[in-house]
Amino acid sequence: MNSMLYLRSLTAAALAAGVLSAQSQFDFGSVYLMSSYHAPAGGTPYPGIARVDPVDGGVTPLVQFNTGSVPAASAAYDPYRDRIVAYCGLGTTLAPALYAIDAAGSWTTIASTYLVRIAPRGDGKIYGYKAGAGHPTVQEVYYVDAAGQEQVLLDVGGASPWRLNDGVPFNDNDPIRAMIYEPSENALFLALMGSNLVPDCGAPSFDVSIRKLPLTADGTALRAPASCNDYDVGGTVSGLPVFETPVGFSYGPGHQLVLGVHTSASGAMPRILRVDPVTTTITPFATYGPFYGDVNFGCCAYCPLTGEALVLEGGNDVWRGFTPGSSGGGRAFGSYGSPGFGGGPGDTLFVVTPIGNGFSLTADATSLSVANGGAQNLDFHPGVAFANHIHLIVGSLSGWAPGFTFAGAHIPLNLDWYSDFTLNAANSAFLVGTLGFLDTNGTAAAQVNYPAGILVGLQGLTMQHAAIAFDGTLAIVHVSNPVALHLLP
C-alpha cells in the first residue's frame, strides 16, 4: 500500500534528521492521586501522591508529604516542566510550597507562593487561586510564571485584577473548586460550588456553575468578559436542595471537558458532566448511582487510555470507571484500602496529558509480561468524519514526547528502531489490524500481541503506540494520542 511506503520514508527521513531529543519521563495517560490519607491495604497510611493503574486499580506511591494537611485540587501535570506540580509540604521544610516533582519522586521548588486548584497553561504559567483568603483576594486568579514569580490575572484592558462576581463580596471563602486551561479556546475555566452562598450566573444557588475566562495571547489578562453557565446536578431530595461541589476538571473525549461533582445526597445523579469549551454548555457525561455508597464521590478525572471517567468512591474505597452515557456503578476495577477510611472530596485525581485533548486511541491493558506474553487491544475512533480513511498504528520504545512534526502534523512518538519494526510488521501476528481502513463509523480495532519470551531483554521498557489517519491523497488528516504498554518481567 502506498501509505506504507510513505510512512516508511517518513520514518527514515525523521531518523536521518536526528529528531530524537529529550524524552518525557512520564507516560501519556498515567493517572495520579494526591490525598492526605492514602490507605493501602495492609500498609501504613500516608499523605502524598501515588500512581494509579487505570485498568486494575493498582497503586504505586510516588512521594510522601511531611504533613497530613493537603489542600484539595493542588496538583497537576505540567508538560512545560515535564513535572507534576503540587502545592504541598516536602522534605524537612515545614512550610508548604509549590513544587515540581519528577517521575522518580525527586523535587525542586518552583515558588513559595500559595496556590490551589492549580491549572498549568503549558507555557510556564500555572494558574490557581487563594482559597480561604478574604475578599477581594479570594475572588482573584493568580499565576506563577516560568521564572517562578507570582502575578495576578488582569481584567479586560489589563488595568486591574479580574474579580469573581465583579468584586462584590459574598459569604463564602472557597468558591472555586476546580480549574483548567483549554488551549483551543485559549480560555481558563473555573468550576464553582453550589452552596447557596456562591453566585452562579445570577443569585446564589445550590447549582454548580462554570466561568469561562477568555485570555489574551500571553495569558496574562482577559481579552473579553467572562461568561457563565450553571447546571443542577442534584435537584432536591426529600424536599431539601442538594449541595453540589466540583471535585475535578479534566480533558475529555471529543474536545470536551469533563467535570466531577460531589453532592450532599445519595441516589442516581449526573455527577460526571461534560462541558463544551466553545459554548460552555453543560450536559451529563454519565449518571453515577444508584448503589450503596454513591454519595461518597471522592475525586474524578477522565482517562484517555481506557476512555472512562475514573472515580475513587470513598464509601467502599472502590475505583470505578464510567464511559460516556453509562449509569449505575460503572466498572468497579479495584479496591483501595479499608472501606470508609480513604477517598474523599479533598483528594485530587489527575492525568498526564499534553495541554488539551482530542483523544481517539484507547486500550484495554497497560502492561504485558515479557515472560508470559500477552496482548493489548487498541480501539482507534477518530469519528465518522474519517470514515473509510486509511489508518496506520506506529510505535516507539523511546517515549511520546516531544515527538516530531511531519507534513504539518505532530506525531506524538520519538522514532526509533521499533517504529520501523511496526511499519514493516504491520498486520503481522504481532501487530494485528494496524494497517487498513476505518469503517463507516470512523473506527478500527487493532491488537499488539507478543508471545511468551519474544521480548526478552526489553523488560522494564515502555512501548508507545499512536494511530494516524490519511485521506485518499495520503495527506495526514488525524493523529491520535499515544497509548503506553509497560513491559514487565
Image (cartoon, rainbow, N blue to C red):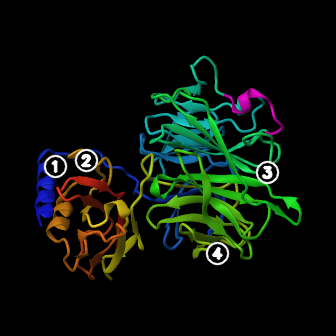
Q: What is the CA distance from the residue labelled 1 to the residue labelled 2?
A: 8 Å
The residue that appears at 88% across and 66% down in the rendered structure is 238
Residue type at mark 3?
Answer: Phe
Question: Mark 4 or mark 2: which comes first in sequence?
Answer: 4
Which one is in front in this view, the residue at disc 3 or the one at disc 4?
3
Q: Is residue 229 something that shows in the picture?
A: yes
Q: Which residue is mark 1?
A: 14
- Under circle 1, the secondary element is helix
Q: Main secondary structure of the magenta part?
A: loop
Residue type at mark 1?
Answer: Ala
* Mark 4 and mark 2 residues within 8 Å of each other at the beta carbon: no
Q: Is residue 209 above or below residue 113?
A: below
Q: Is residue 292 above or below residue 483?
A: below
Question: Mark 1 or mark 4: which comes first in sequence?
Answer: 1
The residue that appears at 44% across and 39% down in the rendered structure is 122
x, y percent for residue 253 = 47, 58
Q: Few, some or many C-alpha atoms within 10 Å of disc 2 (few <14, some 14-19, many ≥20)?
A: some
Instruction: State left or right for residue 450 relative to residue 35.
Output: left
Q: Which residue is mark 3?
A: 206
Question: Mark 3 or mark 4: which comes first in sequence?
Answer: 3
- The residue segment tinted magenta is 163-172
